Image: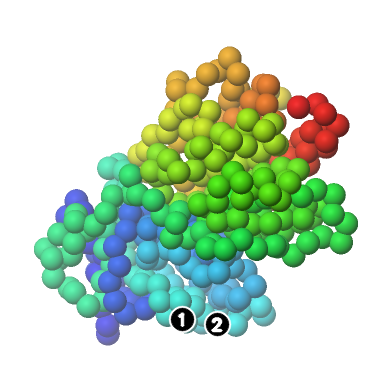
Amino acid sequence: MKKAVLAIEDGHVFEGQPVGAEGESTGELVFNTSMTGYQEILTDPSYAGQIVTMTYTQIGNYGCNEADVESRRPFVAGFVMRECCFEPSNFRATMSLPEYLQKHNVVAIDGVDTRKITTLLRTKGAMKAVISTIDFDHASLVRKAKESPDMAGSDWVKEVSVREEYEYDPPEVKKYRVVAMDYGIKLNILRLLREAGCSVVVLPATATPEDVLKHQPDGVFLSNGPGDPAALPYIYPVIRALIEKHIPIFGICLGHQLIGHALGGTTYKLKFGHRGGNQPVMQNAPGQVEITAQNHGFAVDPNSLNLDKVRISHSHLNDRTVSGLEHDELPIFSVQYHPEASPGPHDSRYLFAKFTKMMDDAKAGKW
């Protein structure tokens, strides 16, 4: 039987079976607690540069298809499972998970102790790792893991963003004109904006304020994305320029963190991050709890913000980190989680309605 090896920078090594592409890949080793949605996880650009460990024991039961993707291709650096299903049972499946991984050149390992891996990450924090199907020397692999790039300080946004702007499928009734900044945008975000009556043009992450303003947007959406928000100084001035124009802005995940920076705040790296479809968040004003989907390894530092003008609208109930921001004087709000996902299943969809109301208010001259 063929062999695959997962080696972590702290010296832990796990041997298993290869279930994806042949080769070797390095990245930051993280874990996701979702029981389903593995294809959406694989194709979420926010995972660029990361090796994802699934904590649920059985992955791949319902196979894969080309309809349930969140972007143009998988962006994960590697995939780790306890038990991968080779014979899926679902009428929508067009291929098995191993076939999908091989087709898209994702290096993956099966048959390893994911509980132990998760315990290590919970104890020590996210660490660098390597998966290999070609090098089985433990010392060599640990050295490669140690020498691989750190996630902190890394700009992965330019890797995942589109190179040219494009118009997303417009709705029949166009109520709003929205510019969506692609830092690693997921397709379901675009679908929900369309359902809300938004005609959306998607711009690359390197777009200038002039690139945005030429479309005369009613609002601007700042998307999710990978890497360290502190490593993206070319984006903050763009957001500040849009803020000065009093254009309604809605940000999620990385977009939320970038708003924090644009408003003068800072971000910091979490020990092991929040990744999964079962993250409890409190709306602070009404005291209402949402079950959210999250995927991030950094958070906004509340002590770095001017809290006389910027309100912490949402808080993560597990560790009290900032999960949402709202400006008291400007049309800006953001959340750290993914309202386009469906863990609740629709707990967070109100945010898109909030965005459209903000654009209505701006048209009426409120801002």
Tell me the residue at 77%/55% (across/down).
199
Query: What amino acid type should be assigned to the residue bearing mark 2?
Result: Met
| SS type, badge 2 | loop
Q: Which mark is residue 146?
A: none
Q: Quadrant of the C terminus?
A: top right
Q: Position of residue 175 (x, y in %)?
A: 85, 49
Tell me the residue at 55%/51% (across/down).
207
* Furthest residue in direction bottom, as rendered: 1
Residue 206 lies, with reference to residue 319, above or below; the image says below
Residue at mark 2? 95
Circle 2 Cα neighbour tier, 10 Å, few/some/many (<14 / 14–19 / ≥20): some
Tell me the residue at 60%/82% (across/down).
94
Tell me the residue at 71%/25% (across/down).
286
User: Looking at the image, can residue 101 be seen?
Assistant: yes
Seen from the viewer's position, the closer of residues 79 and 111 is: 79
Q: Position of residue 139 (x, y in %)?
A: 11, 63
Tags 1 and 2 touching, CB below 8 Å: yes
Seen from the viewer's position, the closer of residues 71 and 109 is: 71
User: Looking at the image, can residue 253 be seen?
Assistant: no
* Furthest residue in direction top, as rendered: 308
Query: How far is disc 1 from disc 2 in space, using C-alphas?
Result: 10 Å
Q: How many marks?
A: 2
Q: Would residue 64 appear left or right of 12 to someone viewing this image?
A: right
Query: What amino acid type should be assigned to the residue bearing mark 1?
Result: Lys
Q: Quadrant of the N terminus?
A: bottom left
Q: Would residue 125 appear left or right of 236 to someone viewing this image?
A: left
Seen from the viewer's position, the closer of residues 116 and 204 is: 204
* Front disc: 1 or 2: 1
* Furthest residue in direction right, as rendered: 173
Residue at mark 1? 103
